Image: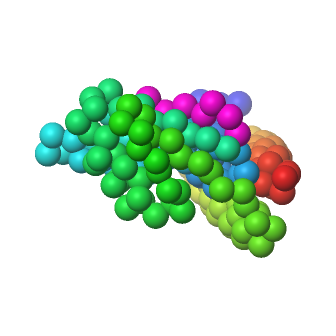
Amino acid sequence: MSEETQAIYNDTKEQMTNAIKHLERELLHIRAGKANPSMLDGVKVESYGTLLPLNQVSSISTPDPRTIIVQPWDKNTMESIEKAIMAANLGFNPQNDGTLIRITVPALTEERRKDLAKKAKEVTETAKISIRTIRKSGNDAAKKLEKEGVPEDEVKRLENDIQQLTDEYTDKANNLLEAKEKDIMTV
């Protein structure tokens, strides 16, 4: 493999890896039945005049599958943390006991589980579209090399390698979806 074809291959692989990492992050935000600190990732708290992510003003833990504990580092931020969780509209009702905020994660209904599984499918399909788009741009770059004088058999080998990458990363996306669906549908 020449330097040019190797560069295209590496770039394509890196972009597909990033698409899978993005999918993993997106799937983390889709709630399964269990409490998870990442459920509060989007919550921003006003602290001393600036908006900060919740995890920068408190520690977040899950002592059991139905409870999230938020322990502020500064007791003066308790009220603004509680308001921020309510304002995030996550369906949680935080209870403030003066030292920490306890959030009970409600059990999911069957209908809600199906909606979340559908959302997971949509997010995964978006990732697979992204992977196919990356394949197309890799193949376009390979064709461009052929016009610049790179031997046809080397370009064909690169296209085959890109297709193998596409299949591999599509399988990874499907496996992530399968695991998430199982997690969501497990009562």
Residue 17 appears in the figure: yes
Residue 56 appears in the figure: no
The vertical placement of 9 against 142, above or below, is above
Q: Residue at x 34, y 46 (%)?
A: 81
Residue extent of the magenta highlight = 58-65
Q: Residue at x 32, y 27 (%)?
A: 73
The vertical placement of 184 against 102, above or below, is below
Q: Residue at x 42, y 34 (%)?
A: 100
Q: In this view of the protein, which residue sits in the foreground, 69 or 130?
A: 69
Q: Residue at x 56, y 40 (%)?
A: 68
**Position of residue 97 measured from the top left corner of the image (x, y, whole percent):** 42, 39
**Position of residue 154 measured from the top left corner of the image (x, y, whole percent):** 74, 41
**Position of residue 165 measured from the top left corner of the image (x, y, whole percent):** 76, 44
**Color style of the picture:** rainbow
Residue sticking out furthest to the left: 49
> Which secondary structure dominates the residues rendered in magenta?
strand
